[in-house]
Image: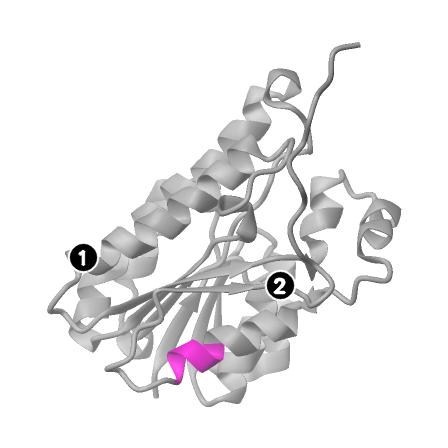
Amino acid sequence: MKTCLITGATAGIGAASARAFVGAGWRVIGTGRREERLKALQEELGAAFLPLSIDMQHLDEVETLAKLDGEWAGIDCLVNNAGLAPPMADLQDSKWDDLKTVLDTNVTGLVALTRACLPKLIAARGLVVNLSSVAGNYPYRGGAVYGGTKAFVRQFSLALRNDLAGTGVRVTSIEPGMAETEFTVVRNGGDQAASDALYAGVEPMTAEDLAGTILWVASQPPHLNFNSIELMPTRQSWAGFAMTRQS
């Protein structure tokens, strides 16, 4: 039985991915900060799910994930899903503590975990799936730091393939557009109404849509590598150029 390590498994894409992989016959190591949610997911999924309370900002905790032994010693697939965005604000109006949390989670924690897990992934000729975003490909106001971290994740994924050339390890960057998860609620300070208004009438992607995509990538023959996959709901496209005019 293969093992998948999924970060940020307490909600959204991470929780949906845990369900999808266990449903497909995998063992799943699921991490997150909200221990009670991980325990609830373990009750749902049973012995095939190992819950570990880990904060991606704490590198000493992150690196322990590469030191599991026994039946959980191997890692065939790493899904770097944990991530967040600061409150929407122009950079000049933002708070440094908010930005640092995003940088430490989306960039530093992701790199540290990937580096620590590479020996096991190389031994398994496994797969790394990194959750980036269309925010890393297309700029928008208020997204300088979040979009910057996701652009990093995409480029990190592409460059990591070079480092792993000849090892058999595959690397894919998944770059979703609008998906209705807790992400927007958290970004709006817990304002569910603001999140609902954003998604109203758009038919956004769901966590299950993206979990299915991740599982599909992991299920493909080992001689195929998907460098990046960008997904959007049909109703989402690109905005025009912004203009400012003299008043």
Task: Give the position of the N terminus as an image quadrant.
Answer: bottom left
Q: Nearer the viewer, mark 2 or mark 1?
A: 2
Is residue 131 among what the camera can see? yes
- Residue identifier under label 2: 232
Could you say where residue 53 lies in the image, as x and y percent from the top left?
50, 55
Give the quadrant of residue 76.
Answer: bottom left
Q: Looking at the image, which residue is at 40% across and 42% down?
A: 107
Q: Is 195 displayed left or right of 113 in the figure?
A: right
Q: Looking at the image, which residue is at 33% across and 74% down?
A: 72
Secondary structure under the numbered disc 1 in the rendered image: helix
Give, as a three-letter code, the residue at label 2.
Met
Closer-to-camera residue (46/81): 81
Mark 1 crowd level (few <14, some 14–19, many ≥20, 10 Å Cα):
few
Give the quadrant of residue 146.
Answer: top right
Secondary structure under the numbered disc 2 in the rendered image: loop
Q: Is 41 displayed left or right of 121 in the figure?
A: right
Residue 218 in magenta stretch? yes
